[in-house]
Amino acid sequence: MTTSAETMIETLKSSQAELVAMRKDVEALREHLHRMIGNIEFCLREVEKNVGRDEP
């Protein structure tokens, strides 16, 4: 039979594992968003370069 303290320790270990997994997910999302922002900035620069080129 497990004691209250043992149950609490297991709960904390489980919570810690979930937090570690969430942190990894957040870091992956941060990297993905950083790449997306870079791509958007590139596209905007390309559009700015091409504005007015087709006009007489």
Image (spheres, rainbow, N blue to C red):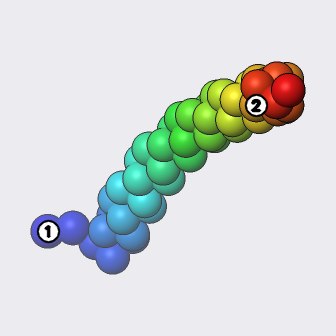
Against 21, residue 49 (above or below) is: above
- Can residue 41 be seen at all in this image of the molecule? no
Against 55, residue 13 (above or below) is: below
Q: In this rendered view, identify the residue nearer to me: 8 or 51.
A: 51
Label 1 crowd bin: few (<14), some (14–19), many (20+), radius 10 Å:
few
Against 18, residue 36 (above or below) is: above
Considering every residue shown, the one lying at the far bottom of the view is 4
Relative to 29, is 40 on the left or the right? right
Query: Quadrant where the N terminus lies?
Result: bottom left
Against 13, residue 49 (above or below) is: above
Label 2 crowd bin: few (<14), some (14–19), many (20+), radius 10 Å:
few
Residue displayed at 48% across by 50% down = 22
The image position of residue 20, as x and y in percent, is: 50, 44
The disc labelled 1 sits on which kind of residue?
A: Met
The image position of residue 36, as x and y in percent, is: 62, 35
Q: In this rendered view, identify the residue nearer to me: 31 or 50.
A: 50
Q: In this rendered view, identify the residue nearer to me: 43 or 39.
A: 43
Distance (Cα) linking label 1 and label 2: 68 Å
- Can residue 7 be seen at all in this image of the molecule? yes
Q: In this rendered view, identify the residue nearer to me: 28 or 10.
A: 28
The image position of residue 25, as x and y in percent, is: 48, 43
Residue at which label 2 appears: 47
Residue at which label 1 appears: 1
Task: Give the quadrant of residue 23.
Answer: top right
Considering every residue shown, the one lying at the far left of the view is 1
